[in-house]
Image (cartoon, coloured by chain):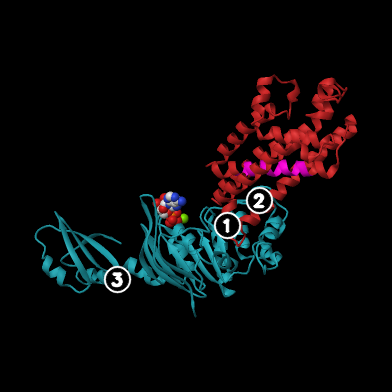
């Protein structure tokens, strides 16, 4: 993705992005893309198909607690998202000498918050969907519009006003805005809206998903 | 010998279907107890209520002195469960599955010996989705034994296996019992129950029809035989009825059917064959 857009647009600084290049703003945005892909596509499909195949029932017949299963599963998926992000950073740095003005723990913290919020949504989809196919479809129906309307694939700066009004109500927009801000060295204090939205998504999503969790 | 399982008045309904309709029985420690019945009889529902995986509507269940609903987690540390239908993540390897399940228990066994016992040692590195049906079934039993359980549940362990694999499975179950474990199994094959079990409950429409040793059950199945006669002219039904061993006599046109107790009926026919000539004999 990064290579694709990078080779189309190059990384010349443009006034549109406040003197930054296409790749500079895209790297944090693509982190959002990875987060939505793992959260709304991998998590629901994996969870719902394990349930449908009877894998979760087999776990249920052991002393394994649902919470232990969920934590292990979240850790595995988090590892996958992190791996994707590291790969992205590597390509950005080596391939395009991407500009980074933030600090690493801060960006990782923001990435983690966004990731966990989207995992909560993903487990929620898995719990609500009666079959793996439906989980997959619902995940995709939610993920694709988010990808294009949140600035994760196409920078919001290039979008018309009307689209930008809609995108304010999309959780992924807040992930992307937060990550881009942190990436360019802004503080957490400047992104209170994003933080509130994401913490809220995480909290409500986790509570509802935990309540609805089913082994079969 | 104590009781491993106590079930009293178990009932479970799914919508309009009464899956289990008032079942009571006990399983003694150290025995192989079987539940036999056709598909849909309520075997899986019963066994999964006992394992604590389904919640009964009514009735009392005690397993190893525990209530499966209230003490589910501590019970499941002590039992081994092979489900009628189950799966593992397709790319999980056999050794990985054994490791994973061992990690669920406080005192797991050395699972290498289990793989050895079930002939899966060469398959240790194979992913789950590349195992044959029989290998998957053996893996599930190995997984059910990884906590060295006191009580093992096997739901239809040989369904879908070829005759040779079935016989091998029977030997494995016998050797499990020889280690002092109690086994509760379900099957829809009477011959399997006959060969494996110390006691068998036959179940149909959610109710226990009979509960006894396999020998006694088979004896009672054979108990009623019938002999069909072609009769021309009148038949002295009263006289036939009075013969010891005859249960009842039915007449339909030229045919008479005599119902009687197993082997005795045959000897009656033998000794009194002159006035009546049996045209066919059926069980
Ligand atoms: N989860 C379920 N939901 C609805 N009906 C079920 C469910 N499980 C079993 N049944 C019904 O309950 C009856 C008993 O099923 P089951 O216990 O699986 O029998 P068996 O194991 O002897 O084949 C059947 O009529 C079956 O269709
Ligand atoms: Mg069954």
> Callout 3: helix, strand or loop?
helix
Q: Chain of mark 1?
A: A
| Residue at left offset 20%, top offset 74% | B244
Q: Position of residue A82 (x, y in %)?
A: 77, 43
| Front of the two marks 2 and 1 | 1
Q: How many marks?
A: 3
Distance of label 2 from label 1 (alpha carbons): 19 Å
> Looking at the picture, does residue A211 appear above or below residue A183?
below
- Can you identify the residue that label 1 sits on? A60
Look at chain B in the picture and name its colour: cyan
Q: Earlier in the sequence, mark 3 or mark 2?
A: 2
- Can you identify the residue that label 2 sits on? B128
Q: Is residue B156 magenta?
A: no
> Looking at the picture, does residue A117 appear above or below residue A155?
below
Chain identifier of the red chain: A
> Callout 1: helix, strand or loop?
helix
Front residue of B81/B258: it is B81
Front residue of B7/A25: it is A25
> Which secondary structure type mostly characterizes the magenta part of the structure?
helix
> Residue B97 vs residue A100: left or right?
left
Residue A12 position by quadrant:
top right
| Front of the two marks 3 and 2 | 2
- Can you identify the residue that label 3 sits on? B263
């Amino acid at each position: 993705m990064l290579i694709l857009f990078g080779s189309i647009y190059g990384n010349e600084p443009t006034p549109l992005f406040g003197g930054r290049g296409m790749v500079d703003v895209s790297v944090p945005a693509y982190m959002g893309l990875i987060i939505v892909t793992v959260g709304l596509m991998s998590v629901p499909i994996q969870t719902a198909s394990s349930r449908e195949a009877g894998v979760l029932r087999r776990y249920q017949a052991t002393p394994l607690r649902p919470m232990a299963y969920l934590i292990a599963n979240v850790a595995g998926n988090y590892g996958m998202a992190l791996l994707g992000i590291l790969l992205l950073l590597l390509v950005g740095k080596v391939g395009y000498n991407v500009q980074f003005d933030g600090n690493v723990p801060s960006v990782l913290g923001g990435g983690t918050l966004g990731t966990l919020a989207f995992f909560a949504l993903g487990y929620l989809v898995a719990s609500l969907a009666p079959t793996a196919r439906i989980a997959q479809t619902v995940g995709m129906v939610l993920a694709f519009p988010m990808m294009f309307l949140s600035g994760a694939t196409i920078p919001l700066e290039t979008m018309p006003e009307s689209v930008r009004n809609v995108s304010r109500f999309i959780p992924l927009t807040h992930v992307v805005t937060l990550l881009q801000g942190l990436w360019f060295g802004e503080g957490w204090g400047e992104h209170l809206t994003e933080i509130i939205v994401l913490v809220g998504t995480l909290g409500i999503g986790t509570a509802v998903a935990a309540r609805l969790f089913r082994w079969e | 010998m104590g009781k491993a399982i106590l079930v009293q008045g178990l009932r479970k309904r799914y919508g309009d279907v009464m899956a289990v309709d008032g079942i009571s029985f006990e399983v003694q420690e150290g025995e192989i107890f079987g539940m036999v019945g056709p598909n849909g009889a309520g075997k899986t529902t019963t066994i999964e209520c006992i394992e604590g995986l389904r919640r009964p509507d009514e009735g009392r269940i005690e397993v190893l002195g525990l209530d499966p609903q209230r003490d589910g987690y501590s019970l499941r540390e002590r039992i081994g469960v092979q489900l009628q239908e189950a799966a593992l993540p397709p790319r999980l390897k056999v050794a990985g599955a054994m490791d994973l399940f061992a990690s669920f228990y406080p005192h797991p066994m050395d699972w290498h010996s289990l793989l050895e016992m079930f002939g899966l040692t060469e398959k240790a590195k194979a992913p789950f989705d590349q195992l044959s049906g029989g290998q998957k079934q053996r893996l599930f039993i190995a997984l059910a034994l990884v906590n060295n359980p006191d009580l093992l549940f096997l739901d239809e362990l040989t369904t879908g296996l070829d005759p040779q694999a079935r016989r091998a499975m029977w030997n494995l179950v016998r050797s499990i019992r020889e280690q002092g474990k109690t086994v509760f199994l379900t099957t829809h094959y009477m011959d399997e129950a006959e060969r494996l079990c110390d006691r068998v409950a036959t179940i149909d429409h959610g109710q226990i029809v009979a509960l006894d040793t396999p020998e006694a059950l088979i004896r009672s199945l054979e108990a009623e035989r019938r002999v069909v006669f072609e009769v021309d002219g009148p038949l002295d039904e009263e006289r036939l009825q009075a013969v010891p061993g005859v249960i009842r006599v039915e007449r339909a046109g030229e045919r008479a059917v005599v119902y009687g107790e197993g082997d005795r009926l045959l000897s009656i026919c033998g000794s009194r064959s002159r006035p009546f000539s049996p045209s066919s004999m059926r069980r």
